[in-house]
Amino acid sequence: MTVLLEVNGLKKYFPIAGKGPSGSMIASWLRSFNQNVPDLRQMLHAVDNVSFSISEGESLGLVGESGCGKSTLVAMLSRLADCTSGKIEFSGRDISAVPARSFHAEPERSELQIVFQDPHESLNPRFTAFDTIAEPLKRLKGLTEKSGLSEKVGALAEQVGLPAALLGRFPHQLSGGQKARVNIARAIAVSPKLLILDEPTSALDVSVQAVILKLLVKLKKDLGMSYLFVSHDLNVVRLLCDRVIVMYLGQIIEEGPTEQIFTNPAHPYTKALNAAVPGGKLRAGEALRLEGDPQSPIDPDPNSCRFYGRCPVGKDVCSRLAPPEVFLTEEHMAACHFVEKQASLDLLE
Amino acid sequence: MDGNDKLKMILGRLLQAIPSIIGIVIVTFVLTRALPGDPAVYFAGPAADEKSIQEIRVSLGLDKSWPEQFWIYITDLATGNLGVSVSTGLPVAEELTRRLPASLELTFLALLFSLAVALPLGVAAATRPNTWVDQLCRVVVTAGVSLPVFFTGLFMVYLFYYILGVAPPPLGRLDIIFLSPPPITNFYTIDALLDGDFETFGAALAQLILPAITLGIFTLAPLARMTRAAMLQVLSSDFIRTARASGLRRSTVLYVYAFRNALLPILTTLGMVFSFMLGSNVLVEKVFAWPGIGSFAIEALIVSDYAAVQGFVLAMAILYVLLNLTIDIAYTLIDPRVGLDG
């Protein structure tokens, strides 16, 4: 399989405003002339040195708790936000070099599409469903009424199971599931190679979720897109994805084929996540509880494991040394000091 | 929504306005009667005796009972007769047709000026929060609301007329060396243009500019503030992100997507500002000796000039009703959702 998207050392830091003299307006003004003026502001490490790849036709799951940097990563990948450093290669081209504000003019804009988290808020309240789906076709494919715009929109609506009669409606006249279909139709309208789904079902009722997920499975089969599926619903990820990456405080802490992540998780955090899945195999009393709060994402210690303090395994070494990336198999990686020991323990059981 | 529906809605709104106008007619009648002071005493003068006061009272129709007076008032109204102003001796209808266009002309130009400044400023401030544009917007807005209009007016006159000498003397609608253009709309600038007299047009415009800017600086503040707030809110919406993912240029997102969504609150503010300006630009009218409707109303109120006050309030009320109607219609043009459920 050829690699479609390759992310290398991607970082996104946000300055914490108004802290210290170097964060002042004068300092940032000086910095605009001379890059050497020191920037001593505190930085929030939203995404910190993330590398992974997606092959053509593959669906990759991205899981992690709230605030771990999933949405920031998605914003950078979909080129709606600039990255602090790092590289995003899409079909062999470095698209991170294109500033987010001018990415709309790139051919990759139509090849890399996104279905946003909240189907209600992400639709323009002044646009009918037809307008919303037609917009990217007009802008990116240059379709007009003459060159079959209506037919194309009608075909898309059928593809996502949206009754054609609803195309003339405004968002407030549609149900949640129908809005989700409009959002998906908008995203697949320009036949993207990679579709990023940012928790596409989190704002929907459970019954509707199942229907939308089925639709996504069907679309993937029909259109052969790659998916990057962001979610904190592990069951959904397990159902839909070939591989999974687990993020914690801006870093990837475990990566591997879905079955391995779910049956043989190596990182203590992934184990805790697995244990928290409702309807899992664990019996009462066996549940793995995480105590305490996550570390602060503001200027974290580079020589410490970010999970330290919350980790049930955590030893002294974790606070002194950043954990190495340990490969259990060729594809299964976990960033932890104690992976091998745990793995052998698991084997003993 | 097709044109037929729209027409129906407009007619509906017009019908809704009828009860309010009837209410206004009654309320203005009662209120003017309830004003303290007896106009007959006032107009008779300090030297008048009981008999001459009574004569004036009879001639004004004030000796009759209220129901009778009201009947006379509405029958007069039906024939378009608004009565005669006791203080100026002219028919009120004539005063209004002369003064209302003067005020409207001033208000429209002021509004145009404040829109031309406030909208770009508000949009720029919203797209670049906490930069110099935003600070500038803040300063202008604060200055606009905190400087009283008579002060800005006097300052303008001092600077542009007295010091720089670029503005004409602040003495009404037209310099005395010009003849007023043939009255068609009673908007001097428009009448001059219709007459093809560009010199008079220029002179009328020159007289207009300073008072319009003075008034505009004051009304600019709420407009700029509302534009900034509405734009900030819309720009942070998720559907703006969707638009960018759909491959829209930043400028398109800004002006087509965001601005159109932000227009509703701006339009509401505009309507409020406009009605506020029409009635309360007395100070500007006084500073620039502008023969507008505000100063006319104030003078009439002070001397209990019933007919004039009634005429003024009625004219304003009808104007407000029309204004609200215009804004309602504008809503449906901007926002396809409005009017569907209304």
Image (cartoon, rainbow, N blue to C red):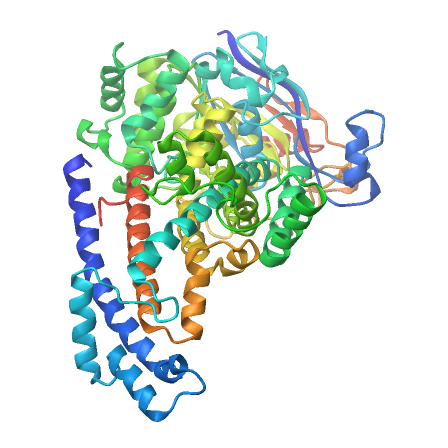
Q: Residue at x 24, y 72 (%)?
A: B26
Left or right of B124: which side holds A296?
A: right
Tell me where residue B309 appears, x and y as whole percent. Answer: 35, 68
Tell me where residue A89 appears, x and y as whole percent. Answer: 58, 13
Camera-side residue of B195 and B109: B195
| Residue B266 at least partly seen | yes
Total marks drawn? Answer: 0
Tell me where residue B113 appears, x and y as whole percent. Answer: 51, 41
Left or right of B139: which side holds B36?
A: left
Camera-side residue of A256 and B281: B281
Q: Can you say whether B212 is above or below B42 in the image?
A: above
| Residue A280 at least partly seen | no
Q: Residue at x 35, y 82 (%)?
A: B40
Location of residue B275 by image quarter: bottom left
Left or right of B83: which side holds B217?
A: right
Camera-side residue of A321 and A279: A321
Location of residue A234 by image quarter: top left
Camera-side residue of A207 and A92: A92
**Seen from this angle, which residue lies furthest bottom?**
B50
Left or right of B63: which side holds B88?
A: right
Tell me where residue B141 appears, x and y as whole percent. Answer: 60, 49
| Image quadrant occupied by the C terminus of chain A | top right
